[in-house]
């Protein structure tokens, strides 16, 4: 079992335990993990979700979350899943604004957005991954990575790893990747969809050098789209089909 597969199995297991202990729909969740710390599962409609509704939207109550963290504090944290509503494309997103606490050394924090029950599209074929960041007051070694994962039961398929290493300074330093596609091959619903952010920040420099990262990321899956060449061949073949139908009708009339 790969390192990622092992980690995701543990995260999904924690999410399942939350589902058992809650009457809310818990197919969608965020999982926050500081380096060396426990995984904190934030279920859609659970105790950390501000609206308390299982509606595919998680706005985290950061006043409840932050006391559980040591090296980081969230100004805001959110995630969305459209699995409840049915659409042309399946999509999971996450975003937030995180700052470094006044602790020593370099630390990282991981945010997973996980939806385990997508029923559409029926024939998923392409996964698109996009992300953006804005850093402030950075030190050497700061970074953020983002990656998407698709799993229809045959093991996870990963997107390329998107990474941003900002320069050292006050900033702001920003980056935006409008999207990279991952071919999923021959797949079918149901499937799970997730993405993972890892943010690494060093020690703050004085009271004014508080390090910050405002981040967002999305993972979208669409059905297989015919290649342009296949569409052209189909269009070329349509007149021949029409002629054949006319010929059969004329023969029958005679």
Image (cartoon, helix red, strand yellow):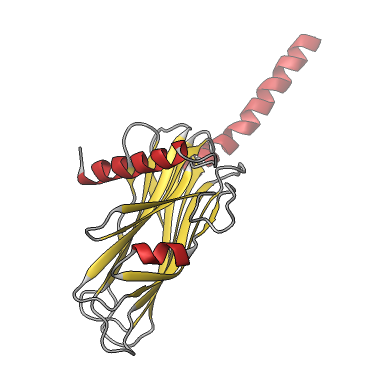
The quarter of the picture where the C terminus appears is top right
Above-or-below relation of 50 to 16: below
Q: Name which quarter of the figure residue 152 lies in.
A: top left
Above-or-below relation of 40 to 155: below
Query: Does any portion of residue 176 appear in the rendered image?
Result: no
Above-or-below relation of 217 to 166: above
Image location (x, y in percent) of residue 148: 37, 51
Residue 96 lies left or right of residue 149; in this view the side is right
Residue ID at (26%, 84%) = 168
Residue ID at (52%, 55%) = 49
Image location (x, y in percent) of residue 220: 48, 50
Residue ID at (55%, 46%) = 89
Q: How many marks?
A: 0
Image location (x, y in percent) of residue 65: 42, 62
Task: Compare residues 179 and 55 and report the one nearer the observer.
Answer: 55
Task: Compare residues 183 and 191 and report the one nearer the observer.
Answer: 191
The quarter of the picture where the N terminus appears is top left
Residue 204 lies left or right of residue 174; in this view the side is left
Q: Name which quarter of the figure residue 231 lies in.
A: top right
Query: Does any portion of residue 245 appear in the rendered image?
Result: yes
Image location (x, y in percent) of residue 236: 58, 36
């Amino acid at each position: 079992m790969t390192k990622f597969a092992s980690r995701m199995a543990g995260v999904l297991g924690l999410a399942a335990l939350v589902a058992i202990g809650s009457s809310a729909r818990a197919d969608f969740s965020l999982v926050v993990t500081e380096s060396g710390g426990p995984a904190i599962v934030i279920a859609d409609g659970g105790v950390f979700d501000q609206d308390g509704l299982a509606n595919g939207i998680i706005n985290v109550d950061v006043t409840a979350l932050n006391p559980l963290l040591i090296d980081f504090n969230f100004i805001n944290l959110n995630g969305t899943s459209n699995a409840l509503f049915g659409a042309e494309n399946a999509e999971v997103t996450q975003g937030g604004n995180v700052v470094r606490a006044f602790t020593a050394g370099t630390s990282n924090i991981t945010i997973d957005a996980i939806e385990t029950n997508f029923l559409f599209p029926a024939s998923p074929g392409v996964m698109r991954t996009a992300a953006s960041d804005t850093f402030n007051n950075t030190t050497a070694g700061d970074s953020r990575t983002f990656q998407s994962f698709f799993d229809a039961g045959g093991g996870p398929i990963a997107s390329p790893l998107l990474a941003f290493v900002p320069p050292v300074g006050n900033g702001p330093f920003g980056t935006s990747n409008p999207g990279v596609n991952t071919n999923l091959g021959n797949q079918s619903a149901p499937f799970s969809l997730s993405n993972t952010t890892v943010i690494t920040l060093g020690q703050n420099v004085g009271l004014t050098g508080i390090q910050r990262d405002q981040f967002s990321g999305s993972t979208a899956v669409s059905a297989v789209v015919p290649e342009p060449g296949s569409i052209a061949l189909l269009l070329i073949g349509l007149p021949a089909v029409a002629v054949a139908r006319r010929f059969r009708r004329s023969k029958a009339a005679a």
